[in-house]
Image (spheres, rainbow, N blue to C red):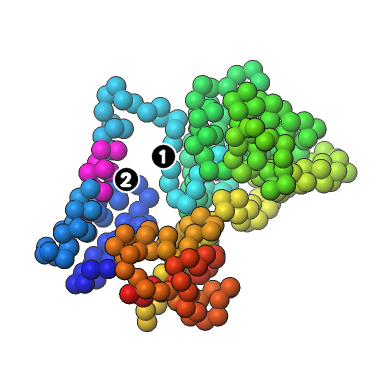
């Protein structure tokens, strides 16, 4: 990192990383540009900041400008990942969104109550994950934007209802409806059902466990389903199994949380870098800054796979919970 950047710069950069909206990000970038001292050593950094600012501004305008309207139903991604809750009518998708996020969707005892998607943010430990409530999967009618909404999401949670019989049918029907769009549920690694369909990692939630029709049937269905999918029986209404569901949702995203710190400083556990599984120290450094990624010599890691402060090379693969010090 180039010398002589004042601490306020790093504070603004940290806020930038944590910002959830384009507007907040823009504000932080502009602040970083103002704070940065103007001399030869910071030329590149300042140019880089200006580029990022104009890119964000362009994005903002593309959304507002007339004639170039993106459908409102493609929701802007926020947080560490975007997960669509999908499933047959009336299974409790909206109820789960209401129980897990800050959103307040319409919940109704009649089917097809959800007509347009709605996003809410779920907090899991120190990570924010975006959940999307969707209209029900139906063989009679699917909105034209529905497949795109699913393609944009990072993973899906298929919500079925234990209060209706034939849980297995509910899953099969969902697959039959998605197949013509070349979309398939992608279960556990061993799941080979949908080789030619493009899918997203999917877990199955068996909702309404409080009202399950037949315990024996439920047990049998669970046994069959879990051969293909990670499953969890919950109740949105009785608020049962929700902490486990949050953890399971984080897990299907396949992410790790990594904490960086300046040598000798304290770790801020509230602001992890949330990165795909298999990210290396080198890739982490490039996330922080391109120039930094070229310059750093080695890293020290505190984590479950290393001994305290172990010195690692650029190709070290990061684990969830690792604390990393990058040394110039
Ligand atoms: N017993 C019980 N009822 C539930 C549970 N979760 C949701 N419900 C009820 O099931 C009905 C449907 O809930 P919604 O959350 O609107 O279901 P949905 O899947 O969003 O429905 P659509 O948007 O029409 O597809 C409502 O009457 C809910 O109160 C649950 O865990 N247990
Ligand atoms: Mg709904």
Query: In front here: 234 or 35?
Result: 35
For label 1, the SS is loop
- Image coordinates of residue 300 in percent, x first then y, are 45, 76
Label 2 with label 1: CB-CB less than 8 Å? yes
Mark 1 vs ligand 2: CB under 8 Å?
Answer: no
Query: Looking at the image, which residue sits at the far left?
Result: 39
Q: Is residue 171 magenta?
A: no
Instruction: Specify few, some or many for label 1: CA neighbours under 10 Å numbering under 14, 14-19, or 20 or more.
Output: few
Instruction: Specify few, some or many for label 2: CA neighbours under 10 Å numbering under 14, 14-19, or 20 or more.
Output: some
Q: Is residue 54 magenta?
A: yes
Answer above or below: position of 89 versus 314: above
From the viewer's perspective, is 162 left or right of 82? right
Q: Report which residue position mark 2 lands on.
A: 22
Query: Looking at the image, which residue sits at the far right?
Result: 216
Which residue is painted at 42% across and 63% down in the image?
A: 282
Query: In front here: 69 or 324?
Result: 324
Query: Looking at the image, which residue sits at the far top?
Result: 140
- Image coordinates of residue 169 in percent, x first then y, are 77, 30
Which residue is painted at 25% across and 38% down in the image?
A: 58
Which residue is painted at 59% across and 40% down in the image?
A: 200
Q: Give the image quarter of residue 34.
A: bottom left
Q: Report which residue position mark 1 lands on.
A: 76
- Image coordinates of residue 162 in percent, x first then y, are 76, 39
Q: Which residues fall within the magenta stretch?
A: 52-59
For label 2, the SS is helix
Q: Main secondary structure of the magenta part?
A: helix
* Res. 322 in view: yes
Mark 2 vs ligand 2: CB under 8 Å?
Answer: no
């Amino acid at each position: 990192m180039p010398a002589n950047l004042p601490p306020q710069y790093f504070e603004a950069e940290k806020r930038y990383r944590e910002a959830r909206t384009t507007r907040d990000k823009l504000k932080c970038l502009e602040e970083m540009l103002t704070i940065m001292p103007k001399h030869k050593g910071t030329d590149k950094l300042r140019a880089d900041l200006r580029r990022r600012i104009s890119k964000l501004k362009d994005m903002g305008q593309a959304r507002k400008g007339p004639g170039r309207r993106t459908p409102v139903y493609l929701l802007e991604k926020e947080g560490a990942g975007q997960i669509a809750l999908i499933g047959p009518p009336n299974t409790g998708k909206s109820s789960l969104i209401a129980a897990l996020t800050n959103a307040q969707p319409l919940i109704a005892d009649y089917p097809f109550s959800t007509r347009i998607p709605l996003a809410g943010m779920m907090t899991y430990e120190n990570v924010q994950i975006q959940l999307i409530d969707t209209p029900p999967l139906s063989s009679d009618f699917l909105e034209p934007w529905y497949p795109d909404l699913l393609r944009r999401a990072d993973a899906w949670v298929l919500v079925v209802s234990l209060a209706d019989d034939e849980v297995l049918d509910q899953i099969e029907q969902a697959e039959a409806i998605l197949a013509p769009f070349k979309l398939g549920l992608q279960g556990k690694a061993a799941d080979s059902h949908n080789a030619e369909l493009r899918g997203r990692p999917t877990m199955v939630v068996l909702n309404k466990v409080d009202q399950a029709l037949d315990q024996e049937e439920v047990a049998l269905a669970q046994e069959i389903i879990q051969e293909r999918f990670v499953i969890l029986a919950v109740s949105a209404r009785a608020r049962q199994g929700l902490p486990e569901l949050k953890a399971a949702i984080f897990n299907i995203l396949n992410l790790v949380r990594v904490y960086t710190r300046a040598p000798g400083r304290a770790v801020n556990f509230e602001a992890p870098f949330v990165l795909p599984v298999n990210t290396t120290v080198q890739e982490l450094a490039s996330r922080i800054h391109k120039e930094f990624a070229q310059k750093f010599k080695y890293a020290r890691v505190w984590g479950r796979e290393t001994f305290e402060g172990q010195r690692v090379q650029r190709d070290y693969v990061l684990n969830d919970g690792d604390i990393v010090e990058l040394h110039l």
